Amino acid sequence: MTLEEKVAQLGSRWLGKDKGATGAAGPEPEESHNVAPMEDEFSGAPALEEASRHGLGHLTRIYGSYPLTVAEGAAELVRQQRIVMASNRLGIPALVHEECLTGFTAHGATVYPSATAWGATFDPDLIERMAGAIGRDMAALGVHQGLSPVLDVVRDYRWGRVEEAISEDPFLVARVAAAYVRGLQSAGVIATLKHFAGYSASRGARNHGPVPMGRRELLDVILPPFETAIVEAGAGSVMNSYADVDGVPAGADSWLLTELLRDEWGFTGTVVSDYWAVPFLAGNHGLAADAGDAGVLSLTAGIDVELPDTIGFGENLVDRVRRGDVDEMYVDRAARRALIQKAELGLLDEGWTPERTVAGAPDADLDSESNRALARELAERSIVLLDPGTALPLSGAGTRIAVVGPCAADARTFLGCYAFPNHVLPRYPGIDPGIGLPDAVTALRAELPDAEIVHETGCAVSGGDRSGFAAAVAAAESADVCLAFVGDLAGLFGNGTSGEGCDAADLRLPGVQAEFVEALLATGKPVVVVVVSGRPYALGDVAGRAAGLVQAFMPGEEGGAAIAGVLSGRIQPSGKLPVQIPRHPGGQPGTYLQPRLGAVHLGVSNLDPTPLYAFGHGRSYTTFTVGDLRVSEAEVPTDGEFSVTVRLTNTGSREGAEVVQLYLADPVAEVTRPVIQLTGFRRVQLAAGAAADVTFRVHTDRVAYTGRRMRRIVEPGELRISVGTSAGDLPCQGTITLTGKVREAGTGRRLDTPVEVLPAQS
């Protein structure tokens, strides 16, 4: 291959960004609405024929840029691939990538619950099944790579992309994300881990903001999910973070992208840039004079393919190699990785045709009944009953129910910012979302046919209009019970209250919703508050006054029926909080994973960090007890194993599921350590009156941490063991002592805690 041909495999082209000048199928946009950061700054990319005259690495978002039918999208994919193949001497096709966080981001495709809702299920197997379904839909339409999952560990609830993240706990993120990777790649679609790394910890929770984080926090909190998804699940691709950590942007960090990722972890796939992250090194970070210099920085650091268009790579790299500014071996390194991936996908096979890759298109149903059933199951398991109060479950027969609030009759509030109806369709007002989207009012009328349901909106999600308060308050006063649906509407770059570029100044409900809830509570009627949101909001002013509290983290297209089923009691709630619910809107935010001075109110500050509802909290309509703690050993060596067993009993009158959670703590260490940290969990389904023994098998690797010399160590001393149903409800307490010498636990250490569940023996 010539130098130009090798460099071409490192580039990409996004025709959908330039709709109207590309000849692509589909309607013209009516509204300006960016779907990627600073999209308007990057225009004037060449025609596809010119962009691929030496070849092309990726085709960007053919299905996910504008509303196309399956047939139109498949035809457009074939058209673009044929241009790429005809334009380059070797006839090498491009790899096609799409977004797929809450489902295939395509018109008419199933919208599953948000990633935070996945975390709320505490059910990795279910997430693996969902990702497998997403992957099969994508593969049937010729897509090779999905830009998911998001492994950012939540550090600040004000960050707009909390809805895309799984949890504030790295172990939960790791288990769920690894399951997603296995599911997507089981269908032959490459999973992309993002955003590598530190993106979620930006100063002030501002999107793309600098990350004031030391190497230890990065190693112990941010990076373990990525390591797990690579080492255990075999993820095929990684996408860099936009942010700089301690002044070094990820896209120019050779320690992160090469030394750690490849040399230590053994990653062999491709590193792709987040959209325009390469030129951002010049324009946003000031590390390079221009896009060409930025291309050299990112290539030598370890980025293999530039997305979504070729700006810093391409001719810029060719020129700099020819001038001797960069060694051609870096081009060879990246091109080899990109081409190996294409070979593994079959793109280099003799006789490969784009028509064959979309052969399943005529029969493809992107929102099939099986998809919807899976979306329904996930939504139902993700709803968190914070407090049943006095009103839940509802009594339907003969009851007058007022259903109010901005999230009651707008099903878009159930969807995340990367769901096609919220991500792309704002550009095309009036176009049907292409999927069934029953809202909460509709779902409640179906759920409670014998109840009289009246609806008033009351206020919008955002803005200051209070003109609807009076009608909603009157509806509440005339009802037996009021259901207030409040929360978020996801969008992008300020066009929503949650989502990419939609960061929050504090944790009050957006707009005038907090005032609206106060007006409803003032009626004296029972008010059940249902928060449908992408982030946790402070509910300290509501708790104890509401007749019930429910949290739904953007539960997807089946979210209306799932919420209605939980409210009626038909569905036994089993969701658990993957993020805490704060008590106050300010003086925080802080996740549960804190050392003593960050987690405990010691009287040295007037600000109490105690959450309103702890990590892992979630109630149900039955009751459970956790007891009979048994620790297999009193002492184990620092390279040993031990087991922790508890008995879970359903002491209520209904079948239900509980998540048994194991936390460990190291009270005396070289550096400050979290007060408690999740080390294992298992969702257990039990009939009324039944009991099970839940055994966690813990290797001492699971308590390794980064010591003062920046090496991961296991040290002798006492460990505290806590088991229960949330970080705030841990009735089983014990200790074990690690003996022997301090031991290093690096690459190859145990990353999981196996769990066994057996029927209890009397």
Image (cartoon, rainbow, N blue to C red):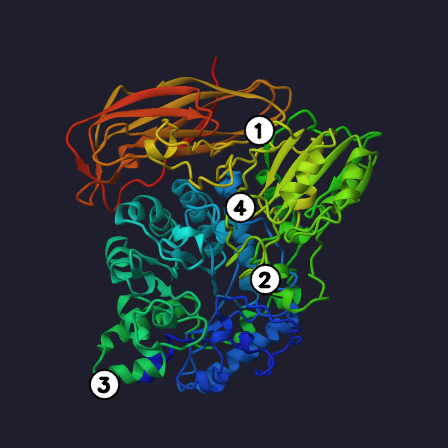
| Viewer-side label of 4, 3 | 4
Q: Residue at x 69, y 39 (%)?
A: 484
Look at the image and tell me in which quarter the N terminus lies: bottom left
- The image position of residue 119, as x and y in percent, is 50, 42
Q: Which residue is mark 2?
A: 423
Name the side, left or right, on which 343 lies relative to 483: left
- The image position of residue 239, as x and y in percent, is 39, 61
Q: Is residue 553 above or below residue 674?
A: below
Q: Residues within 10 Å of mark 3 (few under 14, many from 20)?
A: few
> Circle 2 sits in a helix, a strand or a loop, which is it?
helix
Q: How many marks?
A: 4
Name the side, left or right, on which 371 lies relative to 39: right
- The image position of residue 673, as x and y in percent, is 29, 35
Q: Which residue is mark 1?
A: 619
Q: Which residue is mark 3?
A: 323
> Could you tell which of marks 4 and 3 lies nearer the N-terminus?
3
Q: Are marks 1 and 3 in contact (CB under 8 Å)?
A: no
Label 4 to label 3: alpha-carbon separation: 50 Å
> Could you tell which of marks 1 and 4 lies nearer the N-terminus?
4
Q: Which residue is mark 4?
A: 535
Q: Amino acid at mark 3?
A: Arg
